[in-house]
Image (spheres, helix red, strand yellow):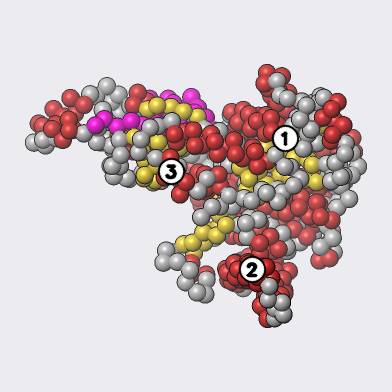
């Protein structure tokens, strides 16, 4: 089964299909670079991304006879050629090294990795002699086996940290290294992601290596869809990225005669708005991501929530993108609208089934059978999502905690109502730390921080309740401006000014005529900025965000040939704007931008690019202390 997004009907950017073909070619070149039968070992966080590029069934045609996920404890793999595809995540290097050392003919003892000191100079002969002294005769077995080869490809590229760790663990000399830039993977017809889950975590650690990956991917994209003539940026990292793009374009000498299929590129830092991810999204796709988490278009949930068994396994995965025709109809709706929508679709399907065919020509019968097949496929999706919606209803409407939490958020966002007592109660009751910190940070960012006495009290309560390791979490949140002391010199609250100048609040959201419906009366900030940019212009937006958020902003033009310009002027459709979230986009923001495409008077049609899909929980977890491999 193929999970790849169908781009044939996406006419707005025709050459995106060619760009994806290039990504597939790069992937197959990696598989074909190792001759003969081989095993493929994958970082399990890359599994879904790779399936969006190429079905696993196709890999057999390229010599892959064995596929497994990289895990902590795994036996010997019965192949002599092993290809590993992993993220450049330092926390994975010990697992990777242990996996390699566990193979029978490697020149090191796997037991050494788990000890406090890892010897880098042990030879196979020394290990054999040690085993013989213990009465274990393995020399002949090892001699009879062919030595294994290990090919490790890092996504998007190997870092000095990863290389140093593998050298420390004694496997560096046994590895053939390579890099694999996945590029912008189509998550949907209008959403393209680098699937770099480490991006935000690296950026807040002052590691800007993800920007190189973004630059290379955007440059390669332009080699297929033409040079993007207009670039706007907002944020420190977006400014650096813009400079890198302009410099790289000169170095690569991109063909500027291709008519640009994208007119505008709007680069914006995730750090510019950390309020929206902390609030509970109430559009369907955002809410199921909030409750269950969608990873690279795949929703993995407990099979117990479904009325009829759909698999023998305890969990099942459901793809959530444009490949599901029913999901398209409901994903951007407010959760209160879902129930009636499902009922209407069910009635529509029942009526279609009862239609009698009067004409019996072969063509008509064929078309009717095809239509019934499509209905059958939608029926399966309707049943699944109906059960998910029922489970959401149980988790939300029947939950006093959810209702109280949501009311606290909305009161805070709309009228600055203080909810500090509720936050202290959550800490006292040892509520889930991620959920608690989200509300704590939301309160801090909206109210301009906490008074010194209250701030110190909260830190003490967090450390006592959740552990000293979260001192690192607190420091990271401070650095991001998410949890801070109140600045007495600043009487005016930033969010209060944004709320008014960007018109973020609309309590009559029920009419669904504005993006404020997504948070029950509150608009996501970045989509509202994008709306202002392409209705009132760059200067109007810049006058608001530059002095208020104190961020780097600017715009650049890339020259294109006159012939390319003339062809482009004949386009009938709205110009395309690729809005790229540096540090991750949320599903609420994606839904808001889709809404603007359908209902707004903006002068462009938005397509969404991002380093990865994120949410409030992921951002908080990115601030946690990670395992120290050193």
Question: Which residue in the structure is indicated by mark 2?
Answer: 366
Q: Is residue 261 magenta?
A: no
Say the numbered circle drawn on residue 61: 3
Question: Which residue in the structure is indicated by mark 1?
Answer: 225
User: Front-most of 580 and 620?
Assistant: 580
Say the numbered circle drawn on residue 422: none
User: Residue 566 location, x and y as percent?
Assistant: 87, 31
Count the marks: how many? 3
| In the displayed structure image, the side of residue 499 where residue 15 appears, left or right | left
Q: Residue at x 70, y 20 (%)?
A: 253
Q: Which residues are magenta?
A: 146-169
Asked whether residue 445 is in view, the answer is no
Q: Which numbered disc, 2 or 1, marks the residue that appears first in the sequence?
A: 1
Q: Quadrant of residue 449?
A: top right
Query: Above or below — where is 382 with respect to 525?
Result: below
| In the displayed structure image, the side of residue 463 where residue 128 appears, left or right | left
Please, what secondary structure does the residue beneath circle 2 have? helix
Give the spatial CA distance, label 3 vs label 1: 30 Å
User: Residue 175 location, x and y as percent?
Assistant: 37, 27
Q: Residue at x 63, y 32 (%)?
A: 217
User: Front-most of 113 and 11?
Assistant: 11
The reply to whether callout 2 and callout 1 are in contact (CB within 8 Å) is: no
Query: Above or below — where is 413 with respect to 451?
Result: below
| In the displayed structure image, the side of residue 422 where residue 137 appears, left or right | left
């Amino acid at each position: 089964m193929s999970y790849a997004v169908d781009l044939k009907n996406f006419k707005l950017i025709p050459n995106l299909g060619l760009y994806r073909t290039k990504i597939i070619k790069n992937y197959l070149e990696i598989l074909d670079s190792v001759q003969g039968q081989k095993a493929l070992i994958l970082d399990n966080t890359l599994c879904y991304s790779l399936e969006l590029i190429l079905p696993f069934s196709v890999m057999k045609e390229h010599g892959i006879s064995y596929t497994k996920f990289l895990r902590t404890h795994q036996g010997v793999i019965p192949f002599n050629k092993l290809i590993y595809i992993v993220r450049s995540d330092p926390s994975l290097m010990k697992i990777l090294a242990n996996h390699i050392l566990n193979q029978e003919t490697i020149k090191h003892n796997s037991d050494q990795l788990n000890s406090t000191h890892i010897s880098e100079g042990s030879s196979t002969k020394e290990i054999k002699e040690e085993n013989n002294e213990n009465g274990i005769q393995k020399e002949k077995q090892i001699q009879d086996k062919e030595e294994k080869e290990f090919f490790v490809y890092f996504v998007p590229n190997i870092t000095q940290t990863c290389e140093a760790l593998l050298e420390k663990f004694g496997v560096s000399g046994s590895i053939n290294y390579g890099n694999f830039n996945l590029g912008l993977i189509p998550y949907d017809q209008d959403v393209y992601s680098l699937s770099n889950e480490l991006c935000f975590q690296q950026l807040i650690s002052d590691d800007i290596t993800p920007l190189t990956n973004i630059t290379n991917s955007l440059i390669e994209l332009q080699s297929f869809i033409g040079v993007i003539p207009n670039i706007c940026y907002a944020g420190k990292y977006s400014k650096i990225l813009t400079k890198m793009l302009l410099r790289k374009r000169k170095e690569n000498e991109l063909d500027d005669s291709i008519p640009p299929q994208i007119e505008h590129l709007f680069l914006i830092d995730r750090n510019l708005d950390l309020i929206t991810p902390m609030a509970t999204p109430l559009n369907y796709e955002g809410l199921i991501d909030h409750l269950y988490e969608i990873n690279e278009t795949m929703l993995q949930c407990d099979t117990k929530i479904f009325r009829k068994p759909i698999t023998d396994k305890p969990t099942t995965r459901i793809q959530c993108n444009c490949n599901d025709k029913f999901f398209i109809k409901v994903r951007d709706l407010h959760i209160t609208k879902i129930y009636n929508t499902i009922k209407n679709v069910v009635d529509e399907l029942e009526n279609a089934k009862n239609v009698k065919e009067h004409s019996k020509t072969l063509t008509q019968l064929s078309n009717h059978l095809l239509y019934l097949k499509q209905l059958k496929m939608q029926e399966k999706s309707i049943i699944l999502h109906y059960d998910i919606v029922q489970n959401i209803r149980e988790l939300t409407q029947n939950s006093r905690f959810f209702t109280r939490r949501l009311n606290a958020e909305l009161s805070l966002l709309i009228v600055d109502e203080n909810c500090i007592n509720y936050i202290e109660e959550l800490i006292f009751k040892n509520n889930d730390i991620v959920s608690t910190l989200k509300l704590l940070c939301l309160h801090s960012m909206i109210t301009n921080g906490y008074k010194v006495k209250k701030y110190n009290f909260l830190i003490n309560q967090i450390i006592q309740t959740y552990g000293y390791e979260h001192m690192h979490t607190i420091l990271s949140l401070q650095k991001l401006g998410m949890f801070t002391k109140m600045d007495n010199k600043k009487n005016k609250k930033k969010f209060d000014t944004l709320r008014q100048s960007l018109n973020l609040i609309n309590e009559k959201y029920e009419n669904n005529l504005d993006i404020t419906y997504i948070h029950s009366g509150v608009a996501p900030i970045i989509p509202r900025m994008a709306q202002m940019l392409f209705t009132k212009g760059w200067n109007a937006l810049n006058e608001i965000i530059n002095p208020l958020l104190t961020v780097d902003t600017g715009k650049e033009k890339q020259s294109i040939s006159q012939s390319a310009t003339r062809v482009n002027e004949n386009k009938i459709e709205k110009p395309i704007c690729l809005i790229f979230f540096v540090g991750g986009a949320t599903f609420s923001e994606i839904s808001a931008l889709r809404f603007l495409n359908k209902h707004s008077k903006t002068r462009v049609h938005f397509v969404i690019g991002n380093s990865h899909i994120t949410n409030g929980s992921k951002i908080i977890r990115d601030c946690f202390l990670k395992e120290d491999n050193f």
